Amino acid sequence: MRKRIIAGNWKMNKTLDEAIDLARAIKDKAADVQNVDMILCPPFTNLSSVVDVVKGTSIGVGAQNLHWEAKGAFTGEISADMLRSVGCQYVIIGHSERRQYFGETDETVNKRIKAALAAGLVPIVCVGETLEEREADKTQEVVETQITGAYRDISSNDAENMVVAYEPVWAIGTGKVATPQQAQEVHAYIRSLLKTVYSEKVAETVRIQYGGSMKPGNAAELLANPDVDGGLIGGASLDADSFLGIINA
Ligand code: 13P
């Protein structure tokens, strides 16, 4: 059985004080949560403080991006070792917002994944189609390209420890959630790709999150699908009650 994994992607939200308050509120409300891996992904500036808040609990902390180079003249960038040094365990890679606004490609996604793995971070790799691509019946094609690009030259040991987030772009921040059937269909397809590229074992081990307008009110039906192992939550992760509402679903 794959353990559920629910992560909050705070995106570019929360100043330091706000981040500490939110992390504290989540920690207090989550004291009894078991059998779910819970991860908070605040902006870089809040990572260290959020790590301090959740220290001694099972709540993990992740970053929203990293650079693939170890160090050097890359103004504005953050390396995998820097993330490790503040206590990060996870890192979101290839979010559609990075692909859309910051020139992220399957090739740079792959480089970032390798850097994360080398530093002992768990990559949460995001894939997903736009509305245009879905309407043109290209969802599988797009997801296949993104998955094979992301996993290029990654060993099966490493592949097993990665997390995939299926985030249909048309569902992100739009309030338009994928139906449980749409989510299950793509999740099963991603698992079948991992089976083809690696093995049944890898495919059955990798956890696949759904992301895109997941809320307390729709989480249960999405998470009831056999191939949906958790969620990557944007808007609803910015409030302790709604985030916990999803965890408790
Ligand atoms: P929303 O939950 O706000 O739709 O965002 C999803 C997302 O992009 C998480 O990474």
Image (spheres, helix red, strand yellow):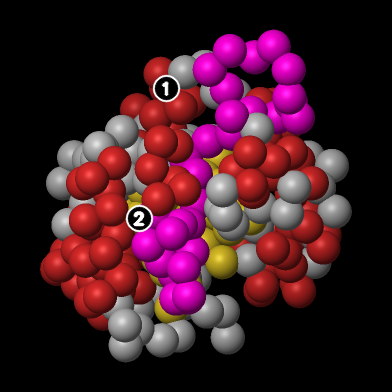
Residue 26 vertical position relative to residue 152 in the rendered view, above or below: below
Identify the residue at horizontal 37%, vertical 62% (top origin).
53
Do callouts 2 and 1 mark residues in contact (Cβ within 8 Å)? no
Residue 124 vertical position relative to residue 207 in the rendered view, above or below: above
Verify whether residue 73 appears in magenta: yes
Tell me the crowding category of disc 1: few under 14, some 14 to 19, or many 20 or more residues within 10 angstroms, Cα based: few
Closer to the camera in the image, 207 or 224: 207
Image coordinates for residue 200, horizontal then vertical, percent: 75, 72
Verify whether residue 228 appears in magenta: no
Q: Which of the 4 quarters of the picture holds residue 129? A: top left
Image coordinates for residue 83, horizontal then vertical, percent: 60, 43
Identify the residue at horizontal 82%, vertical 63% (top origin).
157
In space, the residues marked 2 and 1 are separated at their CA atoms by: 20 Å
Q: Amino acid at mark 1?
A: Gln
| The N terminus: image quadrant | bottom right
Report the number of discs: 2
Q: Give the labeled residue for mark 2.
A: 8
Q: Amino acid at mark 2?
A: Gly
Identify the residue at horizontal 47%, vertical 48% (top origin).
48
Identify the residue at horizontal 63%, vertical 66% (top origin).
206
Which element is circle 1 on?
Answer: helix
Q: Which of the 4 quarters of the picture holds residue 135? A: top left
Which element is circle 2 on?
Answer: strand
Dot placed on the residue nearer the N-terminal end, 2 or 1: 2
Closer to the camera in the image, 213 or 227: 213
Image coordinates for residue 194, horizontal then vertical, percent: 70, 58
- Point out the stretch of residues depicted in magenta: 50-78
Q: Give the labeled residue for mark 1.
A: 100
Closer to the camera in the image, 210 or 59: 59
Q: Is residue 198 left or right of residue 235?
A: right
Specify whether residue 185 is in view.
no
| The C terminus: image quadrant | bottom left
